[in-house]
Image (cartoon, rainbow, N blue to C red):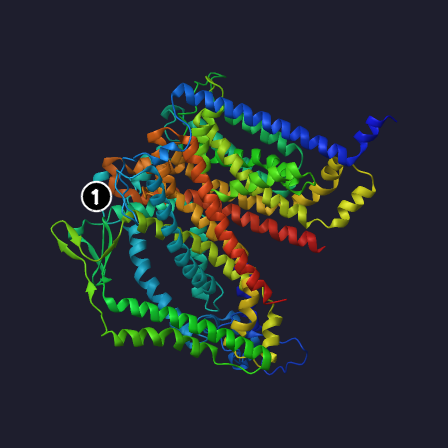
Amino acid sequence: MSNLAKALNSARVRGWLYQGLFLACALAVAWYLVSNTLTNLSTRGVATGFGFLEREAGFEIGESLVSYSASDTYLKALAVGLLNTLAVSAAGVVLATVLGVLIGVARLSSNWMVSRFATLYVETIRNVPLLLQLVVWYTIMNRLPSPREALEVVPHVFLSNRGMKFPVLAEHAGHGWVLLALVAGIAAAIAAVRYGRRRREATGRPFPTLPLAIAAVLLPPVAAFVATGAPLAFDVPELTGFNFEGGGSVTPEFTALLVGLSVYTAGFIAEIVRSGILAVPHGQTEAALALGLKPAQILRLVILPQALRVIVPPLTSQYLNLTKNSSLAVAIGYPDLVSVSNTSANQTGQVVEAVAMMMAVYLIISLCISGFMNWYNRKVALVTR
Amino acid sequence: MSKDTRTDSTTTSAGATPAGAIPTGPVQPVTWAASYEEEPSQASVPPQPGGMTALKPFGWAKDNLFNTPLNTALTVACLAVLWYAVPPMANWLLLNAVWTGGSEICREAAGACWSIIAVKHRLIFFGTYPYDEQWRPFLACGLFVALLGASGVRAFWRPWLAGVWALVLVAMGVLMWGGVFGLTYVANDKWGGLPITLMLSVFSIAIAFPLSILLALGRQSSLPAIRTFCVGFIETMRGVPLVSVLFMASVMFPLFLPEGVTVDKLLRALAGMTLFTAAYLAEAVRGGLQAIPKGQYEAADALGLSYWQKTRLIVLPQALRIVIPPIVNQFISAFKDTSLVTIVGLYDLLTAATVATTDPEWRPFFAEVYIFAGLMFWIFCFSMSRYSQWLERLANRYNRR
């Protein structure tokens, strides 16, 4: 056998050969695509590069968390879009988790009627496309009466086709102190919980963690509130002319998107919570009972730590899904990242840059969320050896 | 699943212990096991004379609706909701509804206006397809749904099923495009509604499936260049929203092609959806690959099989059987996701429904149209999810043996 044949027969050499071939093909395809794109762009007279980010955007954005005007740059416009995406995603994650846990627990309820209601919810919501649900929510928001005939759902909370108006706390110097006291209280509660756990693990004696933690969180802000003279003035929305003045407000687009995303994702989270709790074997509960633990202790010390281990990984992907699904905002006119990128791409013609930036930003958000949840998952996983 | 838990709780709480039976063995019926929030005391096992109470309605209601104060309160709350919600809903949906006639009658009536569906159903189902030719997409969809149903039957899981699929797809192409057998030609920018939704979802899954196997194998490969490429592709696609992939497909693909070559909107959307679905499917397939015991790989190596022989004969047949349920689940999400093509200007079921609601004459009756479109999606998705649950039970039974 010649040397060449021997070399070709070795797995290592062939591995290198295959990889070389693969890389050559990939590079050839990439070069072909890039050269086509460059030719196409130059024949259309479109500039390349990210220089456009410094130029004036020239379009208004419906709602923004920071001040923005049409004379700001594209970079700022995209940042506004990103902030809007993050805002609706963060609010959606919280709302969907609360709703999802409630419904998941309801599905496991021993009450037949409650569990049927929860099942009906899950089976309906999960089997209808999110986009359809969003369009329905948005149509409902748009066909609400005008501000003059706004629905007053609860006193001083108005729902009209301009969105939702609600009272907000009028600003007062005392609020800063209350907030500071709350932060201090939370820190104290965390310290108490940690100390309690260490002492329990070291000595086996129980520690009144929960009452102490609640007291630590609640008492300082209340004290601060009273000490600063109980500043409780509300800025209430009032109907003046054709629209409301004062109070806080959210746009119909934001409301529709937030409600749609939360309701849809909650259906999936409910199933995750349910399967997580069911995944803890009955024997665990029996063993905990045999040890003489109380029901609340069983839930907190035995069931939840094990259920969370099952729940957290799929929950992460639901949070990611919710964030990615917030891009459907473009269909109902909420100015999120996709919508702003799309407008920028249409105005400048630099679609490649716009799409690439959009994808990169979503990738970074996804990596951050999964990084955080992986960290949390490791913490939870440690509980059970 | 939910059914199982329910029967569990009824039997353990009511039927399992006959009255006076002294639990002797270590195995005892545990009432509290089904719901952790409840008081786990033996007192919550009510004495059951004869052990037959579970069959009687009062006993059943007592066990399942009024067994604790909390449950009683919840039941009363649910009944109140039903009492206030059901009569108006029934009135609106059925009793006061208008089934035929023009929009004037609907505006007078207090109930739902189902005549909008009677008037607009052709638009919702088939979009802008030429009106006189709409029997063609109807027949195509019928063939398609029938074959989809038949593919779910285990007895038909034979090699010839692939042949039947190929035949039906060709028939569908002939029906939709026409231009042969005396059928007039209909360009695919006139297609719309249900055929678009069905075809995009099935084709994207069908093309993505082989691609996903390659990607999953590549991700498990020992060759770093190939592994890096596959991981990069899969993670990128899974990290970005489908909307952005569809935008990429609709605006960037034309730039990638040499001058003068154009690909139509439908194909571009299909390409985007396929790449996206392939990444998700690849992760499902990887799950299957990882579930195969290492001994199988080693045994194949010991037999002297080459990589492709090992993959084709040993690994994939076992791995793919495991991943059938996740593939069906992926199909359900692809089916729902096809509604996003409306964002890049394709005319699917949802776009058609939205267009139907914008007719000024019928503008007030958007709810009816969306309920109808939602029901269409729901029927497909719900039946497929039930099917996937059945498949999972089947797989479990198979594995246990």
Q: Quadrant of the C terminus of chain A?
A: bottom right
Along the line of sight, which residue is nearer the eye, B114 or B401? B401
Please identify the residue farthest to the right as the structure is shown.
A1
Q: Is residue A190 above or below residue B303?
A: below
Q: Of residues B369 and A380, which is closer to you in this image?
A: A380
Residue drawn at the location 22% of the way across and 41% of the way down: B105
The answer to whether residue A230 is visible is yes
In the figure, is residue A314 to the left or right of B286?
left
Circle 1 sits in a helix, a strand or a loop, which is it?
Answer: helix
Asked which quadrant contains residue B343, the reply is top left
Residue B63 place in picture, x, y as percent = 48, 73
The residue depicted at 50 percent of the width and 44 percent of the height is B239
- Specify the subunit that label 1 lies on: B
**Type of residue at label 1?**
Arg
Q: Is residue B125 visible?
A: no
Q: Report x, y in % for residue B284.
A: 60, 45
Q: Name the residue at 22% across, 61% down.
A: A167
Residue labelled with disc 1: B107
Residue sitting farthest toward the left: A241
- Residue A309 against residue B43 in the figure, above or below: above
Residue B190 drawn at (x, y percent): 39, 25
Q: Is residue B74 left or right of residue A155?
A: right
